Image: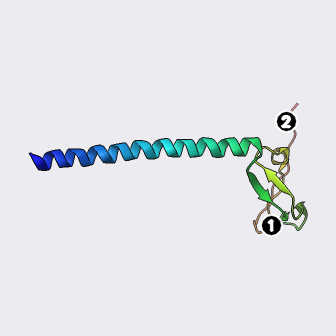
Amino acid sequence: CGAAVAALRAEDVREIAQMRAAREAKAAVAETASELTSGKRVVFTGPLKDNKGKVILAAGQSLGVMDPIFGKMNYLLDGVIGAISRLRSPPS
């Protein structure tokens, strides 16, 4: 009977530890998401060039995830092999 109680307690301890880890993970994710959307956390720091050699982000400049440049991204970064086809106008 003593071994069964000890096993039960070990299971309880594991479950509590898992719940605590889950809360801590959720808090860390929420904090990171907040930092990304507020601009506090930097996503890229230059220099960044496209795969044709054009400077996209100068040395020392930084971009956050909410920077409008991401909506206008029509290039591949240096080291990426390939090309982006031009967007076609929607049919009239």
Q: Residue furthest left?
A: 1
User: Coloring scheme of the render?
Assistant: rainbow
Circle 2 SS class: loop
Q: Position of residue 62 (x, y in %)?
A: 83, 56
Q: Residue at x 85, y 34 (%)?
A: 91
Residue ID for mark 2: 90
x%, y% of residue 87?
Answer: 84, 46
Q: Can you say which quadrant of the picture contains the N terminus?
A: top left
- Circle 2 Cα neighbour tier, 10 Å, few/some/many (<14 / 14–19 / ≥20): few
Residue at position x 87%, y 66% from top? 52
Residue 10 percent across, percent down from the top left: 25, 49
Q: Position of residue 65 (x, y in %)?
A: 75, 47
Q: Secondary structure at mark 1?
A: loop
Position of 37 relative to 80 (above/below): above
The residue under label 1 is: 78
The quarter of the picture where residue 33 lies is top right
Tell me if label 2 and label 1 are in contact, CB under 8 Å. Answer: no
Check disc 2 and give the amino acid type.
Pro
Q: Nearer the viewer, residue 75 or 47?
A: 47
Q: Earlier in the sequence, mark 2 or mark 1?
A: 1
**Label 1 amino acid?**
Asp
Instruction: Calculate the distance from the C-alpha at mark 2 to the C-alpha at mark 1.
Output: 30 Å
Between 19 and 84, the one lying in front of the other is 19
**Which residue sits at x=85%, y=48%?**
69
Q: Is residue 21 left or right of residue 31?
A: left
The residue that appears at 76% across and 69% down in the rendered structure is: 79
Q: Which mark is residue 12?
A: none
Q: Quadrant of the C terminus?
A: top right
Mark 2 vs mark 1, foreground winner is 1
